[in-house]
């Protein structure tokens, strides 16, 4: 306990280290939460976005907090339905064993701005005769607009109001989700204001007497949705943003451990034994320096589409004989001449005992900063592959989101949130590890401590 | 004197041979991977069979023959085509070695699908067309980066512990992100929101006619990518080089020089800068090596028609000769960078210069 408080007191002396650690810990906590809350198989299922998974989400909605930066109240997704209070259902027999069902669904609209899209989902129970439905729209000022007439419905029917060509024509060629809410259709689109007040959606269906209407829901998709927004395939970006954390952490840390530690140990062994071993290791390092690692990695990723573990293994393999080998070697060369090594040799310690008990532990602490500092590099390497659409094809990661956003021209269309959110997370994780690394560097290199 | 020149010449020769062998090995590995364990051969053979079949069907004389006869002729034509492309030999080792030789000499023949802007299918002309743009962008960025970081590091080492010093050093973690990452942000701010500079590409369309306007347009397009590269590396560079300067400026001989009454500038130039240059150049060139590869995504983000973008395009359509060509060029560039590193080291550091005689290299 006393040790813990002492550590904490020490941390206060290095605010940068503390800040970095806090960031890293936050990412670790978020990762643990994510892996438990959204299990892997669920994440993959959500990310693959089979039909039906994300149908009730808007396309390219911005995050809800976008609202805070505008004076307007941006529309959210709302779903007035048959089950709501105040819905009137009337049935009337029209002969030939048919009846007409009329449903009036009232709803309030007080947002500034127009919905992104309108869809009417209906469910019917019928034997053979398909219902014939007509939909009308009553604005607060009483104007009645025909949305669609005499449509033959399926058992689960979605009427894509936003794509009704006839309706568009009736609304002076404005998109239905705009025209149905507009105060005045004679002004240009940029100045158009939505009409606030009570609307009514009137659904009429002609069905056989024994058939029935099970459900009707008007999906008015909003411009903002959730804390992370949605992408062009209606996927909630929260899923990849959350899942990006464990993947980035795992990839960065494992690659750093794999590459740095093996480089370190190999450098120690080769320097101690010298001779042929050292020559060969140096040779491999020389060759490896000339091999264009990233292009080869890109090539392999494209040709073989490896899973993340394979990529991880490749990254480690290609980084073992890196420039670090040269730096470590020069350190070990100096240490090799130290008196305590000579003493160890004198009492007859074996080569490996000297390496693992005397050489490596002596230098390891000075390498801790270096070890932490390379983590962001690997995190960004994974992101780089994903941005080129070459990452693990199954996993939702930050780089994938960036790739999707770039592919959909998010910058050109103005969907900035799509790019900014994953970027900020990438930056934060990189910044966190770097802060820790640089602070450790200052602690372990006392020469640089502020006098 | 003559002896020293000989020794340096011998040293250089040894290094060149060694590096060349390293490049050969690297390229050979690439050739083996690019073959995808024979997968690519099967794809190509299927393509050849398809096109030969199509050609045979177009020929009335052949199309009129009975099926058996026709198949025999098609089979013969496929054989001939495969032999023409040298695909009848086994991939390992014959054909792979032939690929290696042609790759090393950049005699890569014709690209499978890609064409240069002048509609040449020669891999060499496709590559050479893209090389200058990459070198232009990269060299400019690296030069600015080097001198900017060096000057900032010197400046900060003079004002050690001041507010500016702490601020810049506090920014060192920003170098964790690669250039393309800042590229996205920079495009977002200066291209999309402010609209001051072009989003990407390398020259205005239509291409300006006068050389002056051409250069100006090129310059305007270079500002954003160069900025992205510089931002992504400058602060870490300043941080580590400032450390070198600080370590060296507390050495005894520097104290002595100060005590002698030499001007601070002279002390800096003769006693601090001189001995710190070798490690600085080493770290800089190692940085350059890693940044060479980061170019691929950066060029993709900025739509810069360089080698990196070419590589990505070639990968997308599996144009093996172009892929191998780009890797060979990257290999050569890396080897050249390392050679320069060795040589500068030898030229700048007297201790290494003595060491060369022993033939030990580094």
Image (cartoon, rainbow, N blue to C red):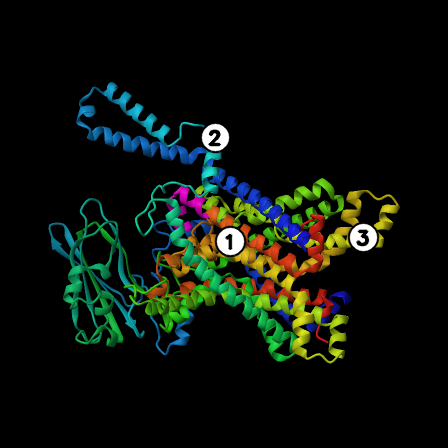
The numbered mark 1 sits on a residue in which chain? A
Span shown in magenta: B309-326
Q: Secondary structure at mark 3?
A: loop
Q: Residue B39's x, y, as percent?
A: 42, 35
Q: Secondary structure at mark 1?
A: helix
Q: Is residue A33 visible?
A: no
The numbered mark 2 sits on a residue in which chain? B
Give the CA distance from mark 1 to mark 2.
Answer: 36 Å
Q: Which residue is mark 2?
A: B94
- Number of other residues with Cα within 10 Å of mark 1, as a class: few under 14, some 14 to 19, many 20 or more: many
Relative to A67, residue B338 above or below? above
Q: Which residue is mark 3?
A: A337
Residues at marks 2 and 3, common chain? no
Tell me if residue A177 is in the magenta stretch: no
Q: Nearer the viewer, residue A438 or A335?
A: A335
Disc 1 + disc 2, Cβ < 8 Å: no
For the stretch drawn in magenta, the main secondary structure is helix
Q: From the viewer's perspective, is the residue at label 2 or at label 3 nearer? A: 2
Give the CA distance from mark 1 to mark 3.
Answer: 40 Å
* Left or right position of B297 against A132: right
- Number of other residues with Cα within 10 Å of mark 2, as a class: few under 14, some 14 to 19, many 20 or more: few
Q: Residue A327's x, y, as percent?
A: 67, 55
The numbered mark 3 sits on a residue in which chain? A
Location of the N terminus of chain B (image quadrant) = bottom right
* Left or right position of B291 against A351: left
Report the number of discs: 3
Pick whichever of labels 1 and 3 is earlier in the sequence: 3
């Amino acid at each position: 306990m006393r040790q813990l408080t002492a550590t904490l007191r020490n941390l206060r002396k290095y605010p940068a280290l503390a800040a970095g650690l806090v960031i890293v810990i936050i990412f670790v906590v978020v990762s643990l939460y994510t892996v438990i809350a959204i299990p892997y198989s669920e994440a993959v299922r959500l990310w693959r976005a089979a039909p039906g998974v994300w149908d009730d989400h808007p396309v390219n909605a911005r995050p809800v907090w976008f609202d805070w930066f505008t004076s307007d109240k941006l529309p959210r997704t709302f779903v007035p339905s048959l089950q709501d209070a105040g819905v009137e259902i009337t049935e009337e027999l029209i002969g030939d064993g048919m009846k007409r069902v009329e449903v009036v669904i009232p709803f309030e609209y007080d947002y500034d701005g127009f919905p992104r899209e309108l869809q009417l989902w209906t469910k019917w129970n019928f034997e053979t005769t398909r219902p014939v439905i007509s939909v009308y729209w009553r604005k607060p000022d009483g104007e009645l607009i025909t949305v669609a007439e005499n449509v033959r419905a399926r058992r689960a029917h979605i009427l894509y109001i936003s794509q009704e060509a006839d309706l568009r024509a009736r609304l002076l060629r404005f998109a239905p989700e705009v025209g149905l809410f507009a105060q005045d259709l004679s002004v240009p689109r940029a100045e158009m204001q939505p009409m606030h007040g009570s609307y009514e959606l009137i659904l009429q269906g002609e069905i056989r007497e024994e058939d029935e209407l099970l459900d009707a829901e008007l999906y008015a998709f909003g411009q903002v949705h959730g804390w992370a927004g949605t992408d062009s395939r209606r996927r909630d970006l929260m899923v990849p943003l959350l899942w990006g954390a464990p993947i980035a952490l795992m990839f960065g840390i494992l690659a750093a451990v794999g590459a740095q530690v093996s480089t370190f140990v190999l450098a120690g062994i080769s320097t101690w034994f010298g001779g042929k071993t050292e020559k060969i290791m140096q040779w491999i390092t020389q060759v490896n320096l000339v091999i264009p690692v990233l292009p080869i990695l890109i090539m392999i990723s494209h040709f073989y589409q490896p899973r993340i573990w394979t990529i991880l293994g490749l990254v480690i393999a290609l980084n073992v004989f890196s420039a670090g080998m040269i730096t470590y070697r020069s350190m070990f060369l100096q240490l090799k001449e130290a008196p305590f090594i000579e003493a160890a040799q004198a009492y007859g310690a074996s080569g490996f005992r000297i390496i693992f008990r005397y050489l490596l532990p002596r230098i390891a602490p000075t390498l801790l900063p270096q070890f932490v500092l390379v983590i962001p590099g690997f995190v960004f390497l994974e992101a780089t592959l994903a941005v080129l659409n070459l990452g693990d094809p199954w996993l939702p990661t930050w780089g994938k989101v960036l790739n999707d956003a770039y592919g959909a021209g998010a910058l050109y269309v103005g969907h900035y949130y799509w790019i900014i959110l994953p970027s900020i997370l990438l930056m934060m994780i990189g910044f966190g590890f770097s802060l820790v690394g640089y602070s450790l560097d200052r602690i372990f290199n006392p020469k640089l401590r502020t006098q | 004197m003559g002896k020293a020149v000989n020794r340096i010449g011998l040293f250089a020769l040894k290094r060149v041979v060694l590096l060349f062998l390293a490049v050969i090995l690297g390229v050979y590995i690439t050739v083996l991977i690019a073959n995808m364990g024979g997968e690519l051969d099967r794809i190509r053979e299927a393509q050849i069979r398809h096109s030969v079949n199509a050609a045979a069907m177009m020929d009335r004389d052949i199309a009129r023959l009975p099926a058996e006869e026709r198949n025999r002729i098609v089979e013969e034509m496929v054989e001939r085509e495969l032999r023409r492309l040298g695909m009848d030999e086994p991939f390992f080792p014959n054909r792979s070695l032939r690929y290696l030789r042609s790759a090393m000499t950049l005699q890569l023949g014709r690209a499978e699908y890609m064409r240069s802007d002048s509609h040449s299918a020669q891999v060499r002309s496709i590559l050479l067309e893209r090389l200058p743009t990459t070198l232009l962008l990269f060299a400019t960025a690296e030069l600015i980066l080097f001198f900017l970081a060096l000057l900032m590091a010197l400046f900060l080492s003079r004002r050690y512990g001041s507010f500016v010093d702490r601020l810049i050093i506090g920014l060192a973690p920003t170098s964790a992100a690669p250039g393309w990452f800042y590229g996205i942000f920079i495009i977002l701010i200066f291209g999309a929101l402010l609209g001051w500079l072009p989003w990407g590409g390398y020259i205005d369309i239509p291409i300006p006619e006068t050389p002056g306007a051409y250069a100006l347009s090129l310059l305007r397009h270079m500002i954003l990518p160069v900025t992205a590269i510089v931002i992504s590396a400058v602060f870490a560079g300043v941080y580590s080089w400032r450390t070198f300067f600080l370590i060296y400026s507390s050495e005894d001989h520097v104290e002595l020089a100060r005590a002698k009454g030499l001007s601070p500038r002279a002390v800096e130039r003769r006693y601090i800068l001189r001995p710190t240059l070798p490690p600085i150049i080493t770290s800089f060139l190692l940085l350059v090596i890693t940044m060479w590869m980061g170019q691929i995504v950066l060029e993709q983000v900025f739509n810069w028609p360089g080698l990196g973008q070419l590589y990505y395009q070639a990968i997308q359509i599996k144009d093996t000769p172009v892929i191998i060509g780009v890797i060979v060029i990257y290999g050569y560039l890396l080897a050249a960078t390392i050679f320069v590193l060795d040589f500068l080291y030898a030229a700048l550091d007297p201790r290494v210069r003595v060491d060369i005689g022993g033939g030990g290299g580094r």
